[in-house]
Image (tube, rainbow, N blue to C red):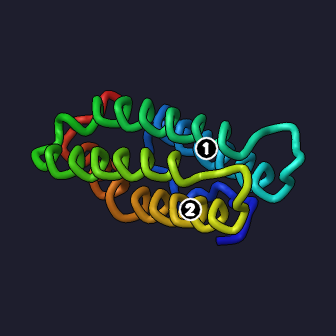
């Protein structure tokens, strides 16, 4: 996955607050890519990875407040929980001394995230919109 990754309209789920958080995840990922490549940069790769995982955790909880109205909420919630577990593993394996491994983890994380937005989030938010279950 090439960095920096650009936000595109196709990623929009149609809810500004959630799009904004997804954009922030992209921004953190781009900072992370720089930190991984410049080992002597201003930000530690491991610290930025930690920040990414914490933001992702908070983001999932915010997103779940919308998704809770969806009949298949449990399924989506489980996907989030499983991914949070994975991020704990990422944080353990991420190291300021192994840029190749860091790049691999970061690429996996962003592939997962963009696919999740495109295939799962968008489907759920469309359903909520079509059924009048979104405040916005
Ligand atoms: Fe999601």
- What element does badge 2 sit on? helix
Where residue 24 sits: x, y (%)?
61, 39
Q: Quadrant of residue 71?
A: top left
Estimate how packed mark 2 is, as few (under 14), some (14 to 19) or many (20 or more) residues with alpha carbons within 10 Å. Answer: some
Residue nearer the viewer, 27 or 86: 86
Task: Tell me: 88 left or right of 51.
Answer: left
Q: Which mark is residue 49?
A: 1
**How many numbered marks does the figure carry?**
2
Residue nearer the viewer, 60 or 91: 91
Residue nearer the viewer, 80 or 122: 80
Estimate how packed mark 1 is, as few (under 14), some (14 to 19) or many (20 or more) residues with alpha carbons within 10 Å. Answer: many
| 78 w.r.t. 133: above or below | below
Q: Residue at x 53, y 37 (%)?
A: 21
Most extreme residue toward the bottom, as rendered?
Answer: 1
Q: Quadrant of residue 51?
A: top right
Q: Quick one: quadrant of the N terminus?
A: bottom right
Task: Tell me: 9 left or right of 126.
Answer: right
Q: Residue at x 49, y 32 (%)?
A: 17
Write down the residue under mark 2: 105
Task: Tell me: 35 left or right of 12.
Answer: right
Q: Quick one: quadrant of the C terminus?
A: top left
- What element does badge 1 sit on? helix
Where residue 63 sits: x, y (%)?
36, 36
| 85 w.r.t. 98: above or below | above
Q: Residue at x 47, y 57 (%)?
A: 113
Where residue 124 sits: x, y (%)?
27, 51
Q: Which mark is residue 1?
A: none
Q: Is the Cβ of the residue at disc 1 closer than 8 Å to that at disc 2? A: yes
């Amino acid at each position: 996955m090439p960095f920096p990754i650009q936000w595109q309209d196709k990623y929009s789920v149609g809810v500004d607050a959630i799009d904004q958080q997804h954009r922030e995840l992209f921004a953190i990922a781009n900072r992370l890519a720089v930190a991984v490549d410049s080992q002597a940069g201003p930000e530690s790769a491991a610290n930025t990875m930690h920040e990414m995982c914490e933001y992702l955790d908070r983001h999932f909880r915010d997103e779940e407040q919308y998704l809770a109205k969806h009949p298949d909420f449990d399924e989506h919630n489980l996907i989030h929980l499983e991914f949070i577990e994975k991020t704990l593993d990422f944080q353990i394996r991420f190291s300021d001394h192994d840029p190749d491994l860091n790049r691999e983890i970061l690429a996996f994380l962003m592939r997962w995230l963009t696919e999740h937005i495109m295939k799962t989030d968008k489907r759920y938010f469309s359903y909520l919109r079509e059924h009048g279950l979104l405040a916005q």
